[in-house]
Image: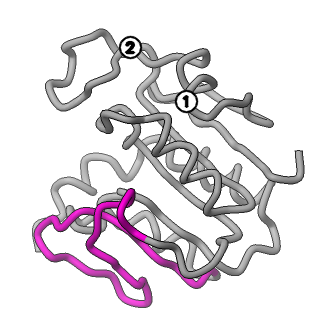
Amino acid sequence: MNNTYWEGRKDLQYYRTVREFAEKYCPDGKTLLDVGGGVGLGCRYLEWFDRYERTSVETPTRGCTMDDVRVLHSDFMDWEPDQQYDLVLCRQVLEHVHDASAFARKLLECGCVVIISVPYRWPAGACSEHVHDPVDESKLNAWTEREPVESAVVDSRLVAVYSQDE
């Protein structure tokens, strides 16, 4: 497998910020759901969450898998969760989804703590695959219908944490 995709991204600070937020807001979590995280592209960041029972839902991409990660190739909006997860991660996905509000609401329904990252204020047209640029706090708040308990802007990405407890 060619890990060029991951090799070019693994040192980005926003990955560490996601991990720090997970430790802060879900220190005793046991189950993790990752949505669209790029396992199929060779993205290895879920290895950093090895204390969790990990599930990844993503569209079929190159058929890659990871040891000890249940990879489900499905459209997230068609997928039916089998449980509520302690931690849900969704990085750099909402900007690709036409109905980002419905997608965000489903993310929040799936987990106790949800961490979402989006490109922060990238200009329209900067990425041909993005349908919502520019994205900022107000757009993300509109999609989730709430404000995060904490957020940070790192590596030109907005990382936001949502908790059912807050």
Residue that carries the numbered disc 2 in the rendered image? 134
Residue 122 lies in the magenta stretch = no
Q: Is residue 106 left or right of residue 121?
A: right
Residue found at x 20% / y 24%: 127
Helix, strand or loop at label 2? It is loop
Question: Earlier along the polypeptide chain: callout 1 or callout 2?
Answer: 2
Question: Residue 166 is drawn in which quadrant?
Answer: top right
Q: Position of residue 96 (x, y in %)?
A: 29, 36
Amino acid at pointer 2: Pro
Q: Is residue 151 left or right of residue 64?
A: right
Closer to the camera in the image, 68 or 144: 144
Residue that carries the numbered disc 1 in the rendered image? 143
Which of label 1 and label 2 is nearer to you? 1
Task: Give the extent of the magenta segment.
Answer: 52-79
Residue 77 lies in the magenta stretch = yes
Magenta segment, prevailing SS (helix, strand or loop): loop
